[in-house]
Each structure stands twice: as C-alpha cells, then as structure tokens.
Image (tube, rainbow, N blue to C red):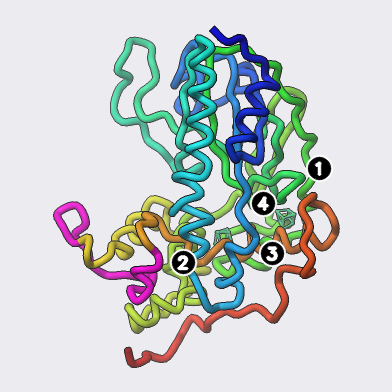
C-alpha cells in the first residue's frame, strides 16, 4: 500500500485542478456544536482537509454590467463550480487517500448559516441526531486557508472572497497548517455593507457580531441577516433582479425593511424559481424569478445567484485588489469600472 505524506496529497490535489489546500486536526473542532462537527460525521476522524477553488472574477462581469446573468450561476456558483469543478478533484484526492488504507469522507458543504433543527432523536444512544451540517467556512479557517471577513464570506490571501470550499474528513493523521491571524485580510472597511443593497450586513457600529474561538484566536464577523440575504441573492430583490419585475409585475418590495427568516426566504425563492418545464409533483410551482428567456442558457443550475453578491464579494474584492491585499492581480485595473446600477424598488409594469 502506498505511504502518503501530506505534501504528496497536496501536490496531487492541486494537480487535479484545486487551488487551495489546508489541513485542520480534529482537535480544532472540539468546541463546535455536535450537529456541526466533522467528528459527528466520522467519529474516528483525525484530520479535516479543506480544499478550494477560485471563483473567476469574470464570472461576475455580466451582472456587474447589468447585461448577462448565466455565467455567474453556471460557472461560479451552483451550476458547475459547487457541483463539479471542486468535487471531481476532491473526490480523486479522497480516492488517493483510500488507496493508502485510510478512510476519506468527502463532504458536500451545505448552506452555512441555516438554523438547522435536528431531525428527531439521535439514531444511536448518546449519538447526534441527523442531520449534521458542517460549516465549511469555519472548517476553512480551522485548516488555515483563510479567514471569515466582516461580511461572513470566507476569504484567502490569493483570491480574497472569490473562493468556494469543500472538505475531506479522514482518519489519516496529518500535520495541521497554521491558523491565519484574524484581520490578516479583512480590514473592516465596510465596503461590503455599502454594496449590499439588501442591507443584510450590519455596520460595525451596530455591534452585531458572531464570534468563534479556535486555539488562541478569536474570529469575529458581522451577524448577517440571512433572510434578506437569501431572498436578495436568489432573485427576490426588486432592486437587483430585472426578471422579477417582468414575471411579477408589482413586486415592489423593499427588502431592506423585511425581517423574514432564512428558511422562509429559501422556501419563497426556491418555490418561485422552479422552471415551467420542471412542473411535476416535486416541482409544483411554475413561476420564475430568474428569467425564463434565459432558460436554455442558465442550464441545470439548481440554485440561482441572481443578485451575484454585490457587496460581500464584488465590492469586497474590488477593495482588496485595489489596495494590493490579494495575490491575484489583473491587467485591466479595478473590477468596478462604472457607476453601479440598481433598479428602483418600484419599477413601472412593463409589457412583455
Ligand atoms: S468589504 Fe471585505 S475587507 Fe471590507 S469589511 Fe467587508 S469583508 Fe472586510
Ligand atoms: S449575497 Fe448579496 S444580499 Fe447577501 S450579504 Fe452578500 S451582498 Fe448582501
């Protein structure tokens, strides 16, 4: 059986197309709630390998210009990046680990902020009730790849917030990577707050934060209003979606005044985003908030990122790139090149 070193696993993972690789020992999760701990998924785990892939800056170009949406959802979000571009090389890395006699559990990360209720009682005496939801961003911090910025978005030195993560839980003992000191990347500039048209990210003056401690470091970020964020991101914000005005004339909702829960926002956005050709018992609603004339272009994306992280990613990486705080640079200067567009919440009903 092949004897693997951490460097061999890392080299292999990067050769398969991943951009980021870091290791946390399982002890770094000792304070995690049991329903979020990798040790609840794999009780014999010794290490959590967190891997990541960049989101292309160009994935957002069409949305930033207000002209073209499918690229971001399909290549930078749920269409391919979350489902294939990270997971295929991660799966191959898990195969490599199992070839050396250790078990490897690849984890498809869930939504990080959900208020997940256990599904009934634990199935084993003194066990943890299903369904465990590992927080991949915290795992990324624990693996030393980066930090969580004020906006609650995970960021790295090379790409700023333009990254997506996944992880492998294994019983192979690996040397953990050093943790990143809090504040290494995020300078609390509040550009994300200004850029978030849903007013989902609190200003630092509001003192609404979430804190976690890993070893000697305390990490703190803004307590994002996930109801507003979810509704806006998935296309329910009248200021950010040209599609909703066409398909729901009269949807003149000021999302910044809404106080809905994340769960309610998901139910709403997912129901409304089911496409007509998916009409079935499972997909009973037929209205679209993402633009049915784009249907052939959006493809089987599953979950749509209509608002495209205007503040927490686009404003943020524009700021970080401008101040030289991220490794990857571009020849064409700042990402945000023109006055930014926002639709008035009240848009006159337009003819189709
Ligand atoms: S824009 Fe980015 S760097 Fe600035 S406070 Fe927000 S998360 Fe931090
Ligand atoms: S995804 Fe959009 S709505 Fe959500 S926090 Fe980021 S900028 Fe705000």
Left or right: 336, with 129 as reference point: right
Q: Residues within 10 Å of mark 1 (few under 14, many from 20)?
A: some
In what element is the residue under mark 4? loop
CA gap between label 3 and label 4 equals 10 Å
Name the residue beneath numbered marker 3. 315
Looking at the image, is 342 positioned above or below residue 98?
below
* Secondary structure mostly taken by the magenta-highlighted segment of the chain: loop
Name the residue beneath numbered marker 4. 161
Q: Nearer the viewer, mark 3 or mark 2?
A: 2
Q: Which stretch appears magenta?
A: 279-298
On residue 235, which mark appears? none
Question: Which of marks 4 and 2 precedes in the sequence?
Answer: 2
- Using the rendered view, name the quadrant where residue 20 is placed: top right
Left or right: 100, with 121 as reference point: right
Q: Is mark 3 within 8 Å of ligand 1?
A: yes
Magenta stretch contains residue 292: yes
CA gap between label 1 and label 3 equals 18 Å
Q: Is mark 4 within 8 Å of ligand 1?
A: yes
Q: Nearer the viewer, residue 105 or 1?
A: 1
């Amino acid at each position: 059986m092949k004897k693997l070193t951490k460097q061999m696993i890392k080299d292999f993972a990067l050769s398969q197309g991943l951009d980021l690789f870091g290791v946390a020992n399982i002890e770094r999760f000792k304070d995690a709630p049991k329903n979020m701990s990798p040790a609840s998924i794999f009780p014999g785990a010794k290490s959590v390998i967190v891997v990541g892939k960049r989101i292309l800056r160009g994935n957002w170009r069409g949305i930033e210009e207000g002209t073209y949406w499918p690229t971001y959802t399909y290549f930078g979000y749920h269409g391919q990046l979350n489902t294939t571009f990270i997971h295929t090389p991660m799966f191959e890395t898990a195969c490599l680990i199992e070839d050396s006699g250790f078990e490897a559990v690849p984890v498809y990360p869930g939504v990080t902020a959900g208020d997940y209720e256990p599904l009934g009682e634990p199935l084993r005496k003194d066990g943890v009730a299903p369904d465990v939801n590992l927080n991949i961003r915290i795992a990324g911090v624990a693996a030393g790849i980066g930090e969580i910025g004020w906006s609650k978005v995970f960021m790295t030195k090379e790409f700023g917030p333009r990254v997506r993560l996944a992880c492998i839980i294994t019983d192979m003992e690996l040397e953990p990577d050093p943790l990143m000191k809090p504040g290494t990347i995020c300078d609390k500039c509040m550009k994300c707050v200004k850029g978030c048209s849903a007013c989902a990210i609190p200003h630092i003056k509001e003192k609404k934060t979430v804190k976690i401690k890993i070893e000697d470091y305390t990490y703190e970020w803004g307590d994002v209003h996930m109801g507003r964020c979810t509704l806006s991101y998935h296309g329910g914000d009248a200021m950010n979606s040209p599609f909703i005005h066409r398909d729901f004339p009269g949807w003149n909702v000021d999302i910044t005044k809404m106080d809905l829960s994340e769960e309610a926002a998901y139910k709403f956005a997912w129901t409304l985003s089911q496409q007509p050709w998916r009409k079935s018992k499972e997909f009973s609603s037929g209205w679209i908030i993402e633009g049915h004339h784009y249907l052939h272009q959006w493809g089987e994306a599953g979950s749509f990122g209509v608002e495209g992280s205007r503040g927490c990613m686009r404003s943020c990486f524009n700021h970080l790139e401008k101040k030289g705080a991220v490794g990857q640079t571009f020849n064409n200067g700042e990402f945000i090149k023109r006055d930014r567009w926002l639709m008035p919440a009240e848009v006159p009903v337009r003819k189709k």
